Image: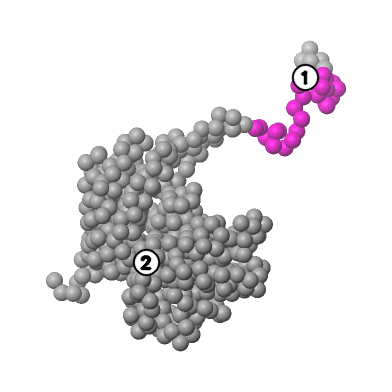
Amino acid sequence: MKLKDRDLLSIQETRDLIVKANAAQKKLAQLSQEKLDLIVKAIADEAFENREKLAKLAVVETGFGNWRDKVIKNAFASQAVYHSIKNLKTVGIIKEDPSQKIIEIGVPVGVIAALIPSTNPTSTAIYKALISIKAGNAIIFSPHPSALNCILETTRIIKEAAEKAGCPEDAINCISNVTLQGTDTLMKHDQVSLILATGGSAMVKAAYSSGTPAIGVGPGNGPAFIEKSADIPLAVKRIIDSKTFDNGVICASEQSVIVEECIREEVMAEFMAQDAYFLSYPEGRKLEKFILRDNGSMNPAIVGKTAEQIADLAQISIPKGTKVLIAEETKVGKNVPYSREKLAPILAFYTEKDWEAACERCIEILHNEGVGHTMAIHSQNEDVIREFALKKPVSRLLVNTSATLGGIGASTSLVPALTLGCGAIGGGSTSDNIGPLNLINIRRVAWGVKELEDIRGDKKPEKFDDHPHKELIERILKQVLEEMK
């Protein structure tokens, strides 16, 4: 087969998978909540059992992150997500309110097209399969080409486990001949009900432009503000933990640190004590050339690499054991690389006069990129935290925690998820951490509780003697009776 025919193969495979998924979903929709829950548990258990194998496959294939942290992500995607959804009602009667005379019925949306990124490939596939099947939907994965094999293996493992537990065949599948044309076919097909898009900005934009309802996430570019009342050693520790977790590839991770002038030196000293390296001005200029490509997008050469690997790339000498590279910055803009999203252990460092100025700087950074996504604040001042909560254009304001782990719901009580909505301000359809309830329609059955007179506000007389037109009615009735004689 000639290379030019690969697009046709991909389109045909995708169409075939959609037909099979549609038939499987009709069977899936007939299953009870109890049966769906058994299938979901089987998927979670098998994915957890294979967490290390899949993590290593992902690192070998993509070159992003490190396998030990990907093991944790696979465990999170399987067990933490499972435990958060296992008791949810998603199909059949999910809620009854006798006092208001309303019943809510969960209805699966149908076939879901799931775009899977290369940064978190196996964990995202596991997570999306769990929330889709829990909601009674079939799912087709469209994998990033650079993570194809590990996603195919993840699909095989969870598909076999699901079908052994009674899941209809072909309710879980993955495109193996991956092309843009195949993915485009998947997103635009009239038998696909919803797109669940996790990936780069271009792919998410394509999902929203496809004509099919979509839930997508934009880029993260979360600032982390360290306020003067914070426990500075702990705040720095949390930021470094977050930024080095899987080498920074989770989009909720911190991208810049903002501090008040009065604690600048203390914060910098603490970062250095915890193995961060502050780049000199010339070193910072050398590294920034590797952060963005000529078209303004993130350079994949730095994604998911260690600080030492990135320093080698930029030909910068740093101490052995350096965990994070930090560059002091004063500007924000599309052409200011450090102020943009960097899915790697690289941070921008801003110093502001006070917390009010820091607040405005955070807003500026977010509107430059990452608006609607996530930011963190480290503070013991409840008034300042409240002011940040009221003003920041984000869907998740994380307080005194790692942004990476807090954003996905691992270190907070947010819904455990690997797709984080950015809301309307971020160009998305929801600000939720996406779960099964985002993947169903709710049919509401409502009994009448008022009559037109109640809505108008008319007073209904309790007795005829109280009727406002009693005398007129009596006269008319008398006249009718006399005429009848």
Q: Nearer the viewer, residue 190 or 93?
A: 93
Whether 190 is drawn above or below 350: the answer is: above
Q: How is the image coloured?
A: one colour
Disc 1 target residue = 463
Task: Report the amino acid beneath label 1.
Answer: Lys
> Which residue appears farthest toward the left when viewing the image?
1
What is the magenta range?
450-476
53 left or right, relative to 344? left
267 left or right, relative to 196? right
Disc 2 target residue = 247
Q: Nearer the viewer, residue 320 or 73?
A: 320
> Which residue appears farthest toward the top when viewing the image?
485
| Percent coordinates x, y for residue 424 in the rendering | 54, 61
Whether residue 342 appears in this view of the structure is: no
Who's the residue at 33% across and 81% down the image?
A: 313
Q: Could you say whether the residue bearing mark 1 is in a helix, strand or loop?
A: loop
First reached walking from the N terminus: tag 1 or tag 2? 2
Q: What number is the disc on residue 50?
A: none
Q: Could you say whether the residue bearing mark 2 is in a helix, strand or loop?
A: helix
Who's the residue at 53% across and 79% down the image?
A: 329
Quarter holding the C terminus is: top right
Whether residue 235 appears in this view of the structure is: yes
| Percent coordinates x, y for residue 218 in the rendering | 46, 65
Quarter holding the N terminus is: bottom left
Task: Report the amino acid beneath label 2.
Answer: Asn
| Percent coordinates x, y for residue 376 in the rendering | 53, 61
Q: Is residue 459 magenta?
A: yes
Q: Nearer the viewer, residue 463 or 323?
A: 323
Q: Is residue 44 magenta?
A: no
Q: Quadrant of residue 124?
A: bottom left
